[in-house]
Amino acid sequence: MIKILFVCMGNICRSPMAEFVMKEKVKKAGLADEFEIASAAIEDYNIGDPVYPPAKAKLAEHGISCSGKKSQLLVKEDYAKYDYIITMENWHIDGIQKICGNDDENKISLMLDYTDEPGNVADPWYTRDFETTWNQVNAGCDGLLKAIMSHVSSHR
């Protein structure tokens, strides 16, 4: 089982978008049984809140449901539980390490490091540009899935 945790500040926009986009991608690839995918926040502002309505609407535009998702806080135990901890912005790495400790196993990476345009995923909470965020998340998930499958096949 390959376990992926997507992380952002509040777990109501970017990381849940990534969680459900990736779930859809592994499902379409016939790999859903091989993955556990979730998302979490590094700050507790929105804990228990549903996915932000414009983010939910952007997913729905692409036929993806995030029904029932509630924001949850990253906990120290998540570091041991997940194989990949994928974050949306460089500064989130510090937040993850404050909660989980040092990244001794090199599990933490940036979402856009799996694309041809590394950097930070635009925060639609501030930009209100959910289309750009969708495009970045979609590209990041494609690249991440490709990297994981390449890694898995090289170790079989």
Image (cartoon, rainbow, N blue to C red):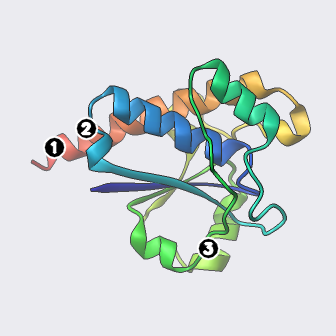
Residue 134 appears left or right of 86? right
Image quadrant assignment for residue 81? bottom left
Image quadrant assignment for residue 13? top right
Of 83 and 23, the residue lying toward us: 23
Q: Element type at marker 1?
A: helix
Q: Which residue is most to the front?
A: 68
Of 88 and 90, the residue lying toward us: 88
What's the residue at 63%, 49% (across, down)?
68
The three-letter amino acid code for the residue at tag 2 is Ser
Instruction: State if disc 2 and disc 3 touch (CB < 8 Å).
Output: no
Q: Would residue 66 be seen by someone viewing this image from the given angle?
A: yes
User: For mark 1, what is the residue?
Assistant: 154
User: For mark 3, what is the residue?
Assistant: 97
What's the residue at 63%, 51% (across, down)?
69
What's the residue at 14%, 50% (across, down)?
155
Quadrant location, the N terminus: bottom left
**Where residue 57 appears, x then y in whole percent?**
74, 28
User: For mark 2, what is the residue?
Assistant: 150
The three-letter amino acid code for the residue at tag 1 is Ser
Q: Would residue 103 be seen by someone viewing this image from the given angle?
A: no
Q: Element type at marker 2?
A: helix
Q: Which mark is residue 23?
A: none
Density class for disc 1 (Cα within 10 Å; few <14, some 14-19, many ≥20) is few
**Where residue 47 appears, x then y in whole percent?**
76, 65
Q: CA distance from mark 1 to mark 2?
A: 6 Å
